[in-house]
């Protein structure tokens, strides 16, 4: 699909297409639809970034809270979104030893208790060792530092999900 076809989408179809580029936050796509026409796909991504950056701190935390824990309850109960499922599998979250799984669960619990939102990292750019290391390091941060760090990761996840959507069309570059 080229950008002119995207610009012609009614909002229902636009939200269907882009509704999970930010995990479980279709409101982002629903809001950004008003910014049409987009010059290209990069402009869609820029509009998403601007929407997120303009949110109050509580809104940014809300976005983080929509993310499932890595190797958490949703993974075990099979209720992850398709995108998250693929990303977590890519980072080896389905293949943790029982010692790694308990360590990750404990670190995730401690992190959430300290910050009030989950640890978010772009799993496709990581692996299980790096995730455990970053989780340990980032747990020491001040809350405002971690909030922005989490949002940076949300943007990386969003970039790769957008690329995934466009991969079928070689003419589209991001
Ligand atoms: N908690 C967390 O980082 N979740 C995620 N990361 C990612 O790449 N996909 C997710 O669902």
Image (cartoon, grey):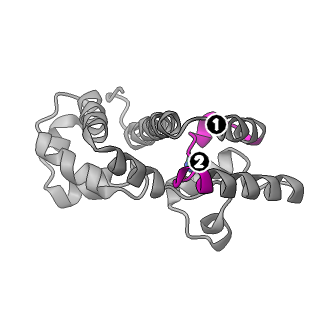
Crowd class of label 2 (few under 14; some 14 to 19; many from 20; radius 10 Å): many
| Residue pointed to by mark 2 | 119
Instruction: Judge: label 2 CB < 8 Å from ligand 1.
Output: yes
Q: Position of residue 137 (x, y in %)?
A: 70, 34
Queried whether the magenta region covers residue 32, the answer comes back as no
**Regarding mark 1 in the picture, which secondary structure is present there?**
helix
Q: Which residue: 20% across, 43% down?
A: 6
Alpha-carbon span between mark 2 and mark 1:
9 Å
Instruction: Judge: label 1 CB < 8 Å from ligand 1.
Output: no
Q: Position of residue 16 (x, y in %)?
A: 29, 58
Q: Which residue: 64% across, 50% down?
A: 111
Q: Between 69 and 87, which is closer to the camera in this rendering? A: 69
Q: Between 72 and 54, which is closer to the camera in this rendering? A: 54
**Regarding mark 2 in the picture, which secondary structure is present there?**
loop
Q: Is residue 173 visible in the rendered structure shown here?
A: yes
Q: Between 77 and 12, which is closer to the camera in this rendering? A: 77
From the viewer's perspective, tell me whether residue 111 is left or right of residue 16.
right
Quadrant in the picture for residue 148 = top left
Q: For the magenta stretch, what is the residue range? A: 112-128
Position above or below: 142 against 88: above
Q: Are marks 2 and 1 in contact (CB under 8 Å)?
A: yes
Q: Is residue 1 visible in the rendered structure shown here?
A: no
N-term mark: 2 or 1: 2
Q: Position of residue 73 (x, y in %)?
A: 64, 68
Q: Between 3 and 43, which is closer to the camera in this rendering? A: 43
| Residue pointed to by mark 1 | 138
Q: Which residue: 39% across, 48% down?
A: 22
Q: Residue furthest bottom?
A: 77
């Amino acid at each position: 699909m080229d950008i002119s076809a995207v610009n012609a989408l009614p909002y229902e179809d636009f939200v269907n297409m882009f509704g999970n580029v930010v995990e479980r936050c279709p409101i982002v796509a629903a809001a950004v639809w008003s910014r049409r026409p987009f010059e290209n796909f990069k402009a869609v991504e820029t509009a998403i970034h601007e929407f997120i950056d303009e949110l109050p701190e509580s809104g940014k935390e809300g976005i983080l809270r929509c993310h499932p824990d890595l190797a958490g309850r949703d993974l075990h109960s099979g209720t992850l979104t398709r995108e998250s499922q693929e990303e977590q599998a890519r980072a080896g979250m389905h293949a943790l030893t029982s010692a790694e799984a308990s360590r990750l669960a404990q670190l995730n619990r401690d992190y959430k208790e300290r910050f009030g939102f989950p640890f978010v990292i772009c799993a496709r750019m990581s692996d299980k060792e790096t995730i455990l290391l970053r989780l340990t390091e980032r747990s020491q941060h001040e809350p405002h530092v971690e909030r922005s760090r989490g949002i940076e990761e949300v943007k990386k996840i969003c970039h790769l999900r957008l690329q995934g959507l466009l991969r079928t069309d070689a003419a589209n570059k991001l």
